[in-house]
Image: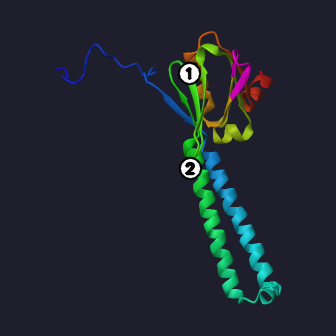
Amino acid sequence: MTDPLVSHNLKPHKDHIDVAHINIRQSISILIMKIVFLDIFSAVVVGAMYLTLNFTEISMYIGLDTAVTTFSFFLIVAVIKISLSMYVVLDWINEYYEVTPSELIYRRGVIYVKEEKVRFSDIRKIELRQGLLGRIFNFGNLILYDFMLKKDLEAFLIHNPQRYLKILSDLIPDLEITKSVVRESIRAEED
């Protein structure tokens, strides 16, 4: 007995998926590193200001109580830190590369959106760069050379660059591919 919902004419192929477009974002590891750095920087600023206010007599010269001055400073730093964290996340959400069957579109901007398009017919070379941290956290750069505009478009710190290199190489015929990957370089030296 066959399932009436399954069409026998459409046999799915496990290595092939048809999609209209793919969005490529910067690696989530980079977003987390930015937020952690922002937290550490905020903690250092708060700690330095707390020590300055408690061990000097600045608050007496200002004419305010130390507790009021400290609370006010902590409140200002908290508002600035929350605002910067929101901006970092919004910037990550609004910066992406959209791959369509015929072009790559780079969109960025939180308030003013900028868009840059590169047609696949104008691309002849792609370079993959992935260092040691990129191999560990699975991020890297893809540099696409547009021979018509004579400039590079760099997909910077994207997640899983090897996968997207394969997708782009399937979409662009006669493509020259260059790889600068730490792990593959080590294997090549051993052989």
Closer to the camera, 183 or 170? 170
Closer to the camera, 25 or 162? 25
**Which residue is under mark 1?**
103
Left or right: 6 in relation to 41: left
Q: Residue at x 36, y 20 (%)?
A: 12
Residue at mark 1 to residue at mark 2: CA–CA distance: 25 Å
Indicate the quadrant where residue 183 lies: top right
Indicate the quadrant where residue 145 lies: top right
Callout 1 environment at 10 Å: few (<14), some (14 to 19), or many (20+)? some
Magenta residues, start to end: 145-153
Residue reaching furthest to the front: 112
**Which residue is under mark 2?**
90
Indicate the quadrant where residue 165 lies: top right
Q: Residue at x 46, y 21 (%)?
A: 15
Label 2 sits on what residue type? Leu
Q: Secondary structure at mark 1?
A: strand
Q: Secondary structure at mark 2?
A: helix
Which of disc 2 and disc 1 is earlier in sequence? 2
Residue 77 lies in the magenta-colored region: no
Question: Which x, y percent locates residue 131?
Answer: 74, 36
Question: Which x, y percent locates residue 123?
Answer: 65, 16
Label 1 sits on what residue type? Glu
